[in-house]
Image (cartoon, rainbow, N blue to C red):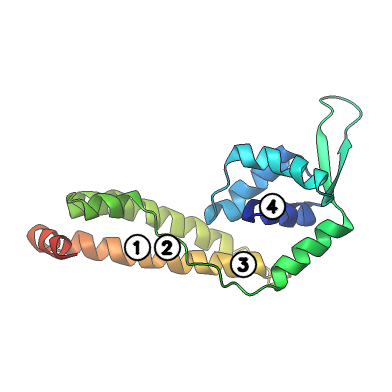
Amino acid sequence: MLTSTSYIVLGLVEWIGEATPYDLKQRIAETVGNFWSVPHSQLYAEPERLAASGHFVERRQQGGRRRRLFSLTDPGREGLSAWRSQPADDPLPELRDPGLLRLFFGADPQAIARTRLDAHREKLRSYEERLARDSGAEPRGPWLALEAGIGHEREWVRFWSELLATEPSAARVAGARA
């Protein structure tokens, strides 16, 4: 059975052409790692599992560290294509934010808002810088995901800014009613 991690690994290898698990780790950090968590242990195990199931072919470098390089097979391409053509009717993701958890349990909203606002402003800035490099060329999927991330970060900036601007007693009362 293929998992979300399987499809991430298949998709990244499709982009790269041939990759080591370390190559995948680097690509994830700069791409889907911005919106999807992939434990490094899974990332190093998944290419071998996909090779065993026939989705990848493995090649060892001849010299040096004799790294393991993985590339897609026809069944790997077909599996990735079939997954992409399925409707996205999965359950919605959890909203996991340590700041919200602290707010829920009574933390000082303004103290939390200050640090969360700075973090979200920085993330928004980095996303907008990346978007400025969009050439308009294909594939569009990464840019569409980036636009979703920008919208998400803008909403966080709005939320934490409003909370920071709220009178401390009013914010505590509003939090107590939730």
First in sequence, mark 4 or 3: give its number: 4
First in sequence, mark 1 or 4: give its number: 4
Q: Label 3 to label 2, Cα distance in Å?
A: 15 Å
Looking at the rendering, which quadrant does residue 32 occupy? bottom right
First in sequence, mark 4 or 2: give its number: 4
Q: Which amino acid lies under the numbered mark 2 shown in the image of this protein?
A: Glu
121 displayed left or right of 177: right
Looking at the rendering, which quadrant does residue 81 occupy? bottom right
Dot in front, 4 or 3: 4
Q: Label 4 to label 3, Cα distance in Å?
A: 22 Å
Q: Label 1 to label 3, Cα distance in Å?
A: 21 Å
Residue of label 3: 143
Q: Which amino acid lies under the numbered mark 1 shown in the image of this protein?
A: Val
Answer whether labels 2 and 1 touch (C-beta < 8 Å): yes
Q: Which amino acid lies under the numbered mark 3 shown in the image of this protein?
A: Trp
- Residue at 75%, 43% (x, y): give it: 49
Specify the farthest residue to the top: 64
Residue of label 4: 6
